[in-house]
Image (cartoon, rainbow, N blue to C red):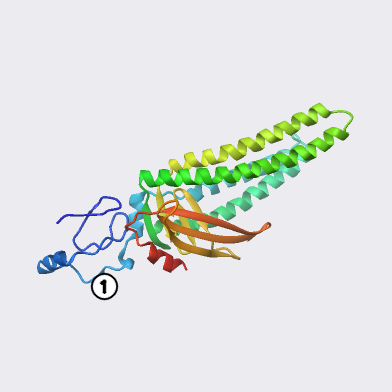
């Protein structure tokens, strides 16, 4: 009987307990199949086909996962270099920016900011590399077009509702603050009003435009899911919870808004404790219970 992987459709050898193409655990043989295959010497012992035998590097090579963090490192270094060049020009007598000390301060800030961001992203790129190589992967699979669409639409609706609430609160604050200035000012009321309208327009464009932008990006994503113990790659986006004062708070299987894996992790920054929620679609054939137990 020909065996086909239910996740990616690849043909399986009789001894495969895991798909060599996508790494997904396959259903057990029926008792009739076991008796037939044992008679022909086609089944190896179960202990020889454990999770550790999966070549994730080979699997991820077929999935063609790219290290998205590495490109961001290069861009940050280019920005830092531009800051250094601008700083140099402000001290060069033949330059049109000579003695433009305001530009000097801004350029120094750009140079240092770009360098710091590059160092942070370089660390993330190294972590991402361990997922691509399979070194830190505990599970990997690829979303079907339908699953990816469900995922993109869910994130779009969720982010749109949150952004709309923030937009209305911010708009009210802007109207109140600018309204007070407009009432007490003797001159420049028209300019102040135009500034207020412009700010509201920028905030509205950001609040309503960003969810649509990320929806398009998710729809165009590679659909690859790589789960590690301390970080994960989800359809082109990298998440990690391995830095100081961070970790997983909740992990469980979900059925809504779709069948999959739910991970909530936390981290601390200048705004104190923050939380991120990941709702990750998965095929029914994937052993999510095993993943949950490894992440807890």
Q: Position of residue 10 (x, y in %)?
A: 25, 51
**As drawn, is 209 to the left or to the right of 1?**
right
Q: Looking at the figure, which quarter contains the N terminus?
A: bottom left
Q: Position of residue 187 (x, y in %)?
A: 87, 28
Asked if residue 222 can be seen in this view, the reply is no
Q: Quadrant of residue 173?
A: top right
Q: Residues within 10 Å of mark 1 (few under 14, many from 20)?
A: few
User: Relative to residue 197, is residue 290 depicted above or below?
Assistant: below
Of residues 30 and 52, the one drawn nearer to the viewer in this rendering: 30
Taking the spot 58% from the left edge, 38% from the top edge, the residue there is 208
Q: Residue furthest right?
A: 186
Q: Position of residue 80 (x, y in %)?
A: 63, 46
Residue in front for this viewpoint, 215 or 68: 215
Q: Residue at x 33, y 50 (%)?
A: 62
Local SS, label 1: helix
As drawn, the residue found furthest toward the top would be 190
Place of residue 17 in the rendered image (x, y in percent of width and height, measured from the top left): 26, 63
User: What count of labels does the image hold?
Assistant: 1
Q: Nearer the viewer, residue 168 or 7?
A: 168
Up-down relation of residue 94 to residue 8 (above or below): above
Q: In the figure, is residue 201 to the left or right of 234? A: right
Query: Is residue 219 visible in this depiction of the protein?
Result: yes
Q: Residue furthest left?
A: 39
| Residue topped by disc 1 | 47
Give the side of residue 262 with respect to residue 119, left or right: left
Outermost residue on the front side: it is 256
**Residue 264 drawn above or below residue 175:** below
Front-most of 116 and 176?
176
Residue 149 occupies quadrant: top left
């Amino acid at each position: 009987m020909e065996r086909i992987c239910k996740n990616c459709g690849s043909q399986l050898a009789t001894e495969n307990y895991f798909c060599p193409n996508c790494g997904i655990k396959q259903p057990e043989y029926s008792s009739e199949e076991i008796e037939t295959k044992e008679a022909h010497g086609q089944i190896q012992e179960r202990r020889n086909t454990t999770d550790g035998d999966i070549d994730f590097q080979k699997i991820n090579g077929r999935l063609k996962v790219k290290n998205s963090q590495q490109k961001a490192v290069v861009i940050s270094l280019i920005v830092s270099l531009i800051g250094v060049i601008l700083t140099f020009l402000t001290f060069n007598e033949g330059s049109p920016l000579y003695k433009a000390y305001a530009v000097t301060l801004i350029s120094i800030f750009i140079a240092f900011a770009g360098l710091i961001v590059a160092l942070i992203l370089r660390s993330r790129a190294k972590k991402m590399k361990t997922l691509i190589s399979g070194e830190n992967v505990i599970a990997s699979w690829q979303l079907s077009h339908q699953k990816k669409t469900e995922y993109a639409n869910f994130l779009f609706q969720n982010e749109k509702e949150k952004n709309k609430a923030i937009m209305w609160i911010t708009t009210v604050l802007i109207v109140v603050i600018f309204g007070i200035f407009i009432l007490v000012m003797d001159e420049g009321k028209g300019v102040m009003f135009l500034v207020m309208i412009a700010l509201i327009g920028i905030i509205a464009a950001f609040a309503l435009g960003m969810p649509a932008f990320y929806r398009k990006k998710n729809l165009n994503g590679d659909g690859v899911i790589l789960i590690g113990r301390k970080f994960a790659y989800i359809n082109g986006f990298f998440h990690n919870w391995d830095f100081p004062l961070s970790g997983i708070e909740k992990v469980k299987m979900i059925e809504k808004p779709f069948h999959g894996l739910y991970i909530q992790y936390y981290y601390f920054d200048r705004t104190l404790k923050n939380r991120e929620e990941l709702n990750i679609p998965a095929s029914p054939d994937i052993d999510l219970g095993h993943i949950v137990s490894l992440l807890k």
